Image (cartoon, rainbow, N blue to C red):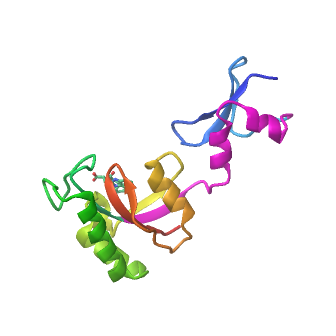
């Protein structure tokens, strides 16, 4: 079998096909390979996972950091000492106040989010697979547009996510 493998493009954060013999690369699966042969290539799992995801999504989030966050500091608080449990309780409070309203989401994110995106109602803009921490990306892709997530945990802290596109 030819020596193709699937890699992730660091610039675009999406999979591509690379032939380690000829050093050829291409975005789409090389012609002539059956679906089974593609699935058997090294790295194919990445391709199969990503291939059914839209190229990019847009989301806003409300982040509450805690003492175990990667950077336990924010525009709101120089030294964040709350526990993860306290952060989750706060987020659940906010979630019930937001009660599914995108307007309320933006208002509370502006006031309470520990991310710099608070100044924009929590809007992160568009992002592609591979650009955000995996739990955040997976949670966003599993939301419908207009839907708000449950509490999601990343190395940055705990989040509510509103998918906007
Ligand atoms: O990484 C950033 C900036 C994110 C951003 C992207 C696009 C527009 C505006 C902000 N801020 C971190 C907190 C943080 N961690 C995150 C993890 C996933 C998504 C958003 C996040 N925000 C921090 O402040 O520690």
How far across and down, in percent of the image, does residue 133 sit? Answer: 43, 48
Taking the spot 47% from the left edge, 49% from the top edge, the residue there is 134
Tell me how many marks there are.
0
The image quarter containing residue 8 is top right
Q: Is residue 102 left or right of residue 145?
A: left
The image quarter containing residue 113 is bottom left
Answer above or below: position of 35 versus 5: below
The boundaries of the magenta stretch are: 32-61
How far across and down, in percent of the image, does residue 103 sit? Answer: 38, 80
Figure quadrant of the N terminus:
top right
Report the image quarter containing ligand 1: bottom left
Nearest to the observer: residue 162 or residue 12 = 162
Q: Is residue 35 magenta?
A: yes
Taking the spot 28% from the left edge, 70% from the top edge, the residue there is 89
Q: Residue furthest left?
A: 78
- Residue 103 visible at all: yes
């Amino acid at each position: 079998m030819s020596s193709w493998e699937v890699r992730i493009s660091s610039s675009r954060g999406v999979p591509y096909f690379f032939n380690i013999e000829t050093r050829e690369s291409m975005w789409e699966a090389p012609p002539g390979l059956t679906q089974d042969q593609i699935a058997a290539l090294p790295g194919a799992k990445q391709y199969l996972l990503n291939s059914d995801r839209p190229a990019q999504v847009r989301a806003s989030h409300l982040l509450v950091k805690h003492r175990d966050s990667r950077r336990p500091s924010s525009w709101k608080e120089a030294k964040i000492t709350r526990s993860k449990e306290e952060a989750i309780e706060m987020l659940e409070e906010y979630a019930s106040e937001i009660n599914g309203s995108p307007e309320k989401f933006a208002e509370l994110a502006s006031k309470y989010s520990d991310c710099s995106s608070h100044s924009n109602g929590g809007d992160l803009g568009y992002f592609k697979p591979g650009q955000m921490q995996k739990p955040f990306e997976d949670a966003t892709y599993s939301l419908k547009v207009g839907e708000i997530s449950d509490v999601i945990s990343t190395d940055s802290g705990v989040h509510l996510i509103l998918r906007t596109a």
